[in-house]
Structures are given as C-alpha cells and as structure tokens.
Amino acid sequence: MIFIFFAGIDLGSTMTKVVILDDTEHICATVVEHTGAEHRKLAYKVMEEALGKAKLSLDDIAYIIATGYGRINVPFADKQLTELTCHARGVNYFFPGACTAVDIGGQDAKGLMIQNGKLLDFVMSDKCAAGTGRFLEVIAAALGITMDDLGALSAASKNRVPISSTCTIFAQQEVVNHLSKGVSVEDIVAGLHDAIASRVVRMVRRLKVEPEVVFTGGVAKNSGMVRALADNLGCPVLVPSEPLLSGAIGAAITGKEMVMKAQAEGRKLETGMRKMGETTFFQQDKV
Amino acid sequence: MNTLSVKGMDTVKELYKNRSQRVIQLKKEGYPIFGYLCLYPPIEMLTALDIVPYRILGDMKEPITKADTYLPTVVCPFLRSVLDLGLKAKYEFLDGIVTAHICDVGSSMSSIWNYAIKTPFSYHLDTPHTTHETALEQAKGQMQSFKKALEKYTGKKITNQSLKKAITLHNQQRMLVRRLYELKKHDPPLVTGVETLMIIKVLQSLPVNEGNTLLTAVIQEIEERAIPPEKKSARLLVWGSIIDSTPLLDMIEGLDANIVIDDTCVGSRAFFQDVPLTPNLIDGLAKHYLADIKCPRTFNARDYYAKSRQWGTELQERFGYLGDYAKKWNINGVVLESVRYCDTHGYEVPGIKDYFSEIGLPTIYLEHDYTEGALAQLRTRMQGFLEIIN
C-alpha cells in the first residue's frame, strides 16, 4: 500500500507549528518552535525537522498548505490559507461536532463559528495585546513567574482581584499596585485570567455561541485560562490534546481534501515551486 | 481658461498623484478656488459663480502632528488629517472653505479651521439630520443664506440661468459617473475598484467641465480596453465611510475579489441621483443634498414619527437601495468599512448587517485607522471572509 502525505505549516506570530499527516489522517510528525525573527526567515528548517522526524522527503508530500500570520513567507508551500479557515478544520478534527471555537494566540484572539469543519463566520481582536498570550507574558514577567506557573497559581487563589482588561500597559501598573498593597500573586493571576477571558468572551458573543466551546491556541495550555473561559462563557470548554496544532492540522487536512477532490475529478493538483531555502520576500503585496 | 490636456487614465493617474496641480494653475489664471468638506455643500452654486469647487480630503501618508493640539486623538482620523493639512498650509491656495454639519467632529473641525487657519471666505451650512418636511424647509433656508453669502463675497449674482447651467453640468457629470459604473456590471468588471476611486477623487479635484471632458475620454478608453481586469471569484460591494487613498481597496483587489460597486463618499454616493431642476432651483438642491445623498449622517427612514415601527420595514427604507445595487451589479459579498472612531458609520453597521443577512448576502466589517500601512491584520480578515464566500 502506498501512503500519501500532507503537511500543514502554521507560522504564527509567536510559535511555528508543522504537522505531517498520512491519508488516514494519522499524525506522522509534529514540530513546534518559537517563531522569532530568524525563524520567520527559516521556516524551511522547521519543515526539514518535521520531514526528518517522519523519515520523509519533500517529494513524498502531496500537498503543503501554509497558514498563520507568516503564511506568505513560506516559499515551499503549495497554497496559503488563513488561519481562520484552517483552525475551523483543525477543531473539527479533534471535536467533529463542535460549532464554536475560541483561539487565543500570541498576538490575537479569534472566535469561530463552524459547521462540519467549514468556517461560517468569525470575529478577531484588533491591534492590541490585551486579551492575548502577549498580555500573560508581560504580566508574568512583571510578577517574576513563568507562563507554566500560571495555571497552578490561579487554582490556588482564594479571593480573586478584579483587573482592568482594557490595556496591557495599564493592567501591568494595576498589578504592581496590587502587589504593593499586599495582594497575593495567586489572587492577581486569577484576576488576570478572568480579565482576558471576559474580554475575549464579550467579543465572541457577537457570534452565536453553541456549547460546548473548543479552546485552542497556545493560551489553551494554561489550565487557569480554561477555567476562566468556561466561567465567563457559562458552559463547558473542551481543549484538544494539542491545542497549538489545530491550525497546522487543519491546513494539512484541507490539503488532503483538495488532493482527494482533484483525484476524484480526474485532475492533478498543481504544487508550487517548493523552494526550500531562506525566505527572501517579506513584502505582502500579493498573497 | 487654458484647457487641460486629456489622455484618459494616464491623466487620471497623474492628477491622482498630485491632485492640486490643476487648481493651483487655475488660481494663477484668476479663478477663485473654494474647498468643500464632505458631500453636503451645494457645489453647483460655486460653479455658477465661476468658482472652482475642490473637495477637501486628508492624506493617509502624512503623519498627524499639528492637529492633536486642537482635536483629541480618539476622533475621526480623516478629519484630524484634514485639519492637520490645513495647519501645515497644504490648503493655503484656497480662497474659501465651505463646510456643513456633517457630524459633530466635522462641525468642530470647521470652527477650529476658522479660528486657526483663516481662509478668506468661510461658510458653514447647518444641514439637518432628518428628511421630514420641517427639515427640508430648514435645508432650503440654509441654501438661501449660503447663496446670499456667496453673492455678497463675490459681488456677483447667482442668476436662475447661471445656476440652472451649473446644475446641468454637474448632472452631466453624475450621468457620466453612472455610465462608468455600468462598465462594472460586466464580469470581470471593465474597471477596477482602485481605478474607480482614483477617477472619482480626480473628478472632485477639477472644475466640472474639465472633469466631464476627462471622464468622457476615460470611459471611451475603458470601453476599448484590450485587456480587462482579471476575473475573480468574489464580486464585492464596498459600503462605508471615507477612503480617499487606494491601499485598502488595493489590498482587497490583490486577493480573489473585484470591487464592482460601492456606496462610499469618494465613490458612487455623490453621483447616483441627479439634482432635480425644480421651478425654484433651490428646492431641488435642498432635496438632493438633504435626502438623496445616502450618508448615514442623515437618518433616512420615512415614517419618522410613527409610533410603532417594524424593523424589517425600516431596514428596507434605509438600505433598500443597497439591495438594488446588489442585484444590478450581481454581487456575492459585502465589505462594510469604517474609519476608526466614526460613530456615524459604526452605528449603522448592525442595521446594514441585518439587512444583508435578510437578503442572504455575507458581510464583513473592517475598521481601519486611516493609514496606508498596517494592513496585514485586515488582509487576514478579508482573506478569511473570501474563503467563506468562495
């Protein structure tokens, strides 16, 4: 039996994710790396790492779809799709019945309305760090704790303090103010999670929210955020086993579906130039 | 008047880059140049007196530095940009400025302009915000007072004949613009959204007769085009506030979409209805400028005093014309755009969304901050929207 493989690469603002799937949608390899300035240029290295893990070469991959903010900086991809469409497909992979998803990444938050893996509608946060992973990073640094500590700390809170959710910079000042008043770090962290969740939920409510809600993106790894989101939504929240990978998985599956559709119609799906090398174009003139 | 050399789209592109070049030349020849803000001043009266009407616009490329002394940063960046250009003497060639109560910020900006910039002639029309009978009377009164002020300033009379001639010339321009938009009904459209914006902006920077000559040449050139724009999956209607520079539309048309019809104010909004030639010409002007221009700064529902109003009926009254556009230009998606902090357009969005959802057309709302850069996020939204449509 000959396997065909598909790859999705999600170049997010903070993390780069690659997933390689076979035609049974079994995950053959995944790689998650910090994006950083260098990695934006060096997306091909992350791809090579994933190919190495799966013991495959680039020619074994039938179709590659790039997604995320950096999607146009992937010269070896065959097609670019927005992370909105790819997340919707990825959420469906983990939870086939899901109709609503919340994705909180490094630099934005999104709400998605999904039907059978297809994106129906979406909302996205604006140019602002409040209500994103960046907000947590800034405040964690101010508190001298790591991102991994946040979940456990918030669980230990007995008396959550309210934190203004409008602006990262002002919230940071508020945190320092609470600290000087002797409020415990646990109560501050719980307040932060609530601030982000309430901001995101207000935005997501512009869509029709249908439980249960799927929570993806790097911030979904934080158990404190999962609790805060469920509290604010007033319904259970489901988190995939790999919340960071939903975009890359969705991209790979969409690639598979496109190849299958083309095969069924008796045509060959053209691949791109597949240039494995440093990205030299950062202009976003044409996508 | 030395004539403008006309070479169709090439002339449009050249004037788009430096749109004041022609009026500055005309000023040297002795023609007074009056700036007007938004679509509410009756420019026919200026034309009737041989004054060149020149639309006051902002500049997305110019960072706002001086206006922040006078206006808070959380108001319309277009009007902030206009004031900023005024303060930087970019409009010093103007002999007059005509403004209207377009919105509260627009009005404040006008009075700040008078205080800080001091253009020789200045007039502010207190245009009502509803269209019922008493509002129309008020609009007529405003038109009369404006006419008197112009006559006093120039020492010349606006005769019935000269006004009628001016209205006819401007109506001719409206007819030509509608002909241009006819070319967008083709699939692919014969002229892009970006080109349309450039053409309209140039028309609003030229005397009406020169604009008409240029537009006639442009239409002919476009009709004979060997290579039309590329066919795309989405045919879009763009509704919204001011976009006076091409990058946003360019971003949209760089994706799998053509903009085939718009309802924006550097677009179709000023041109789709003629000024009626009523026995008293002022009546026709008042009706046109109060009720016919469909900017959300005017509340357009008919049964304004009705005790119980049906939402569906009201939506049809206010936005039915957009449904007509949708059918005639055969669109499959709607972009609602608004410059940030424009409450006037922002408050209209939920109603318009409901209206289009009733008639089965998907919408996306884009709020932009009146700059040419930072389009990456909007591009993702726009592309996501197109992925849903296609």
Image (cartoon, coloured by chain):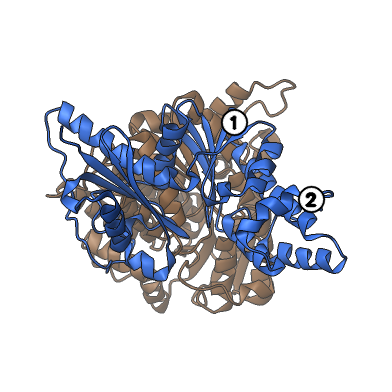
Chain colours: A blue, B brown
Q: CA distance from mark 2 to mark 1?
A: 28 Å
Residue shown at 43% from the left, 46% from the top: A245
Between B313 and B127, which is closer to the camera in this rendering?
Answer: B313
- Place residue B81 in its image quadrant: bottom right
Indicate the quadrant containing the C terminus of chain B: top left, top right, bottom left or bottom right: top left
Chain of the residue that carries numbered disc 2 in the rendered image: A
Residue shown at 55% from the left, 67% from the top: B82
Indicate whether B267 appears above or below B370.
Answer: above
Indicate the quadrant containing the N terminus of chain B: top left, top right, bottom left or bottom right: bottom left
Q: Position of residue A191 (x, y in %)?
A: 75, 52
Question: Can I make out residue B336 in this image?
Answer: yes
Q: Which mark is residue B354?
A: none
- Camera-nearest label, 2 or 1: 2
Indicate whether B28 appears above or below A6.
Answer: below
- Place residue A177 in its image quadrant: bottom right
Q: Which mark is residue A209?
A: 1
Q: Position of residue B226 (x, y in %)?
A: 12, 49
Residue at image mark 2? A157
